[in-house]
Image (cartoon, rainbow, N blue to C red):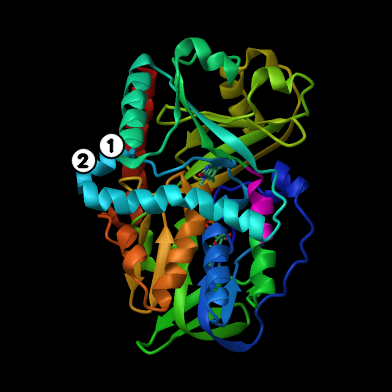
Amino acid sequence: MKMIGASDLNQSYYAATAQAWETQASLASAEDCDIVVIGGGFTGLSAALACAEKGLSVILLEANSIGFGASGRNGGQLIPGLRWSMREIDAAFGRARAQAIFDLAYGAVDRVKNRIAEHHISCDAKSGHLEAAYKPAHFDAMQRDAAFLAQHFGWEAQIVPPQDVGRHISGGGYHGGIYDPQGGHFHPLNYALGLAKAAQKAGVRIYENSAAQTLADTGTHVEIRAGAGTVTAKHVIMAADTWTGGIAAQLSSYTVPIMNYNIATAPLSHADQLLPSDAAVADSRFVLNYFRLSADRRLIFGGGEKYVQQPPRDIAAFVRKHMVEVFPSLAHTPIDYAWGGAVGVTINRLPHMGRAGNVFFAHGFSGHGALVTTLAGELMAEAVIGTLSRFDVFANLPHNRFPGGKWLARPLATLGLLYYAMRDRL
Ligand SMILES: Cc1cc2nc3c(=O)[nH]c(=O)nc-3n(C[C@H](O)[C@H](O)[C@H](O)COP(=O)(O)OP(=O)(O)OC[C@H]3O[C@@H](n4cnc5c(N)ncnc54)[C@H](O)[C@@H]3O)c2cc1C
């Protein structure tokens, strides 16, 4: 399976600096297990590891290589919570549900930190995340959100007035921001590979280059065909993010893939001047710019989205123009790596989790998946053994399919996204 419009992972900074990983064989025989996990990103790896820890036998099928999807390509920004503020969640669902969502979504920070610590995952993890206000009105809303979060849920983030933004970032002309010391950044591919090694140690059988092609749920068990082999299992954990279409068509209309692009500059001698607190930064636009420093002092910058599958002819040039808006001094800085990936987005930007027969699924983290996916995998591992209370908090979130069916869903979603992108410019 080749991802639409995605540039090859080998061109990414992450692939060039990945920890050693022995490529795993493809599935070539008939196997059985308790749980078959489809997808070797954060969600699938976390689910597989958590299932194995519960004593279940697990097979993980990855169509390409571990971390090939968004998990090995993302901006590495660890942003606590979901795309909705707790103020929005509280208004939509009421305090009791909001508290349950808060406990999980913000508790996800500790789940990632615990996995890193317990499995000694070397992934350049750093603390500190700044959400930077692109407009004064955005800063007003951010302050209200931060005050609400502190007052009702006890989550303390720091309000950064406009005159203090320079402590975190020199450039961009931002109108204030919120600094969250509990957020941060990491090398996402190395986190994924660390999870994969931990899962293998716990007994998970991982097959790479093994795209699941068909899925049959008989009611008592499931059968998956992948490459030259088959797997029979009690349950499937579907963790293929926005690529579920080929095998679980009923899920695919809940997400659309939005292409997003990243670059890594050459190492910068003045990196500390650009981002003095070494925080990851994401701005408050709908089509946001986000950036951070790598361990070897490169600027890793993400900016600009494409609603067509085809990547820009020159990804580096496409992203550079956004980077130079924020950091004009980097206009002629060499760009060593440029890559892209698909962000699986739901209509309401909340993750879509649930169960259909013997298939448990979690996808559509809508650009906010670096933290919550680890938790989502663990919630599915709880659900397959019948512990549903935490899984149901997410599974009960309301979701709609993208309208337009197989052919029109994407163009219609594109129109909606273009509208919001246009509002950024007003
Ligand atoms: C460019 C980019 C930047 C991002 N930046 C951030 C960020 O800074 N912070 C943040 O929180 N989130 C970010 N995200 C989102 C985040 O990366 C995702 O939400 C998260 O990685 C999703 O993880 P996943 O495991 O669910 O899916 P993925 O990582 O996409 O994994 C799905 C896997 O399933 C495999 N697969 C697909 N079909 C099959 C099949 N039939 N059989 C077997 N395997 C299959 C794919 O090859 C893939 O490896 C970004 C995403 C992108 C693309």
Q: Residue at point 54% right, 33% down?
A: 129
- Residue 358, x across and y down, in percent: 38, 79
191 and 402: which is toward the camera: 191
Mark 2 CB in 8 Å range of ligand 1? no
Identify the image quadrant of residue 100.
Answer: bottom left
Which label number is shown at residue 181?
none
Mark 1 CB in 8 Å range of ligand 1? no
* Amino acid marked by disc 1: Arg
111 and 317: which is toward the camera: 111
Identify the image quadrant of residue 206.
Answer: bottom right
The residue that label 2 is drawn on is 91
The residue that label 1 is drawn on is 87
In screen coordinates, is 68 left or right of 251?
right
Q: Residue at point 52% right, 57% down?
A: 374
The span picked out in magenta is: 186-194
Q: How busy is the neighbourhood of tag 1: few (under 14 within 10 Å), some, or many (20 plus)? A: some
The relative height of residue 210 versus residue 281 in the rendered view (above or below) is: below
- Residue 42, x across and y down, in percent: 56, 58
Image quarter in which the C terminus is found:
top left
